[in-house]
Amino acid sequence: MAVVKSVGRVIEVFELMRDTRRPLTGTEIGRTLDYPKSSTNAILKSLVALGYLSLDQEGLTYFPTLRLTQLGDWVPAALLGSGEAANLVGELHEATGETVTLSMQNDLSIELLRLIPGKFPISLRVREGFMAPLFGTGIGSALLSTMPDDRVEALAERFNAQARRRRDRVDISAVMQEVRQVRSQGYAAAYDRLMDDTGAVAMPLPKSLEGRQLIVAVAGLGDRIRRNETMIVRTMRRAIGRYYTTARRS
């Protein structure tokens, strides 16, 4: 989907400030993001006028204001509830040493809401906010397993309609077969799907009171995850059972 250029640039400015975590001049921002000077100045002046950036007149540097943080300070609690999900991610990380993620659906994608990197020298390294396809990933299959068949098929048809290349389309019958298998065993295990030499075990959590479906996953080097799959599944089920009274059990 095409992104309105001005909207995309505003978000990129905020992401740059998140990454650098220091005041930046307009020249630094424009050069780093490869924006025209006129566009950079217009964006920064507008954000200052709206109260989301502050301008230090002495150093001519820009920095986020507290008003910017207030836009989203309520989101973690709304998405993650009273803390069970975040605590679960931490416990699974300590128990497995692998990268542990918490994800939810974002249209035809999966968005990583929370992530703790693995402790091993070779671990899955992605950042929070990373978007992965809903179809063709273990996390996506775990999420699809919570939906009725007609909903899965409708999403798959829309996914195929939006695919730019024929090879990116999914075989709907194969999708349904995998979804039914995940429902039957209570988890999805996927290898070499999103990235080569990686593996993941994913399980759906009981829906929140707001009806949001979260997926927890343990991911890392494919051979290591495959070798420890049974232990990982057992560990995840026990942990989910402690944090959620309605956890799925085999």
Image (cartoon, grey):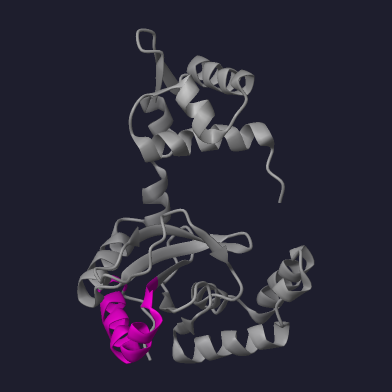
Does residue 109 appear left or right of residue 114 in this picture?
right
- Residue sitting at the far left: 94
Of 81 and 88, the residue lying toward us: 88
| Residue shown at the point (41%, 13%) measured from the top left | 60
Does residue 95 appear left or right of residue 22 in this picture?
left
Question: Looking at the picture, does residue 138 appear above or below residue 24?
Answer: below
| Residue shown at the point (62%, 23%) measured from the top left | 39
Q: Residue 127 is drawn in which quadrant? A: bottom left
| Residue shown at the point (61%, 73%) measured from the top left | 135
Question: Looking at the picture, does residue 151 appear above or below residue 81?
Answer: below
Does residue 242 appear left or right of residue 176 in this picture?
left
**Number of numbered labels in the structure image:** 0
Question: Looking at the picture, does residue 120 appear above or below residue 35?
Answer: below
Q: Position of residue 126 (x, y in %)?
A: 41, 60
Which SS type dominates the magenta stretch? helix
114 magenta-colored: no
In this picture, which residue range is highlighted in magenta?
217-244
Is residue 98 visible to us here? Answer: yes
Of 46 and 19, the residue lying toward us: 19
Q: Position of residue 105 (x, y in %)?
A: 54, 62
| Residue shown at the point (47%, 57%) measured from the top left | 210
Q: Position of residue 168 (x, y in %)?
A: 70, 72
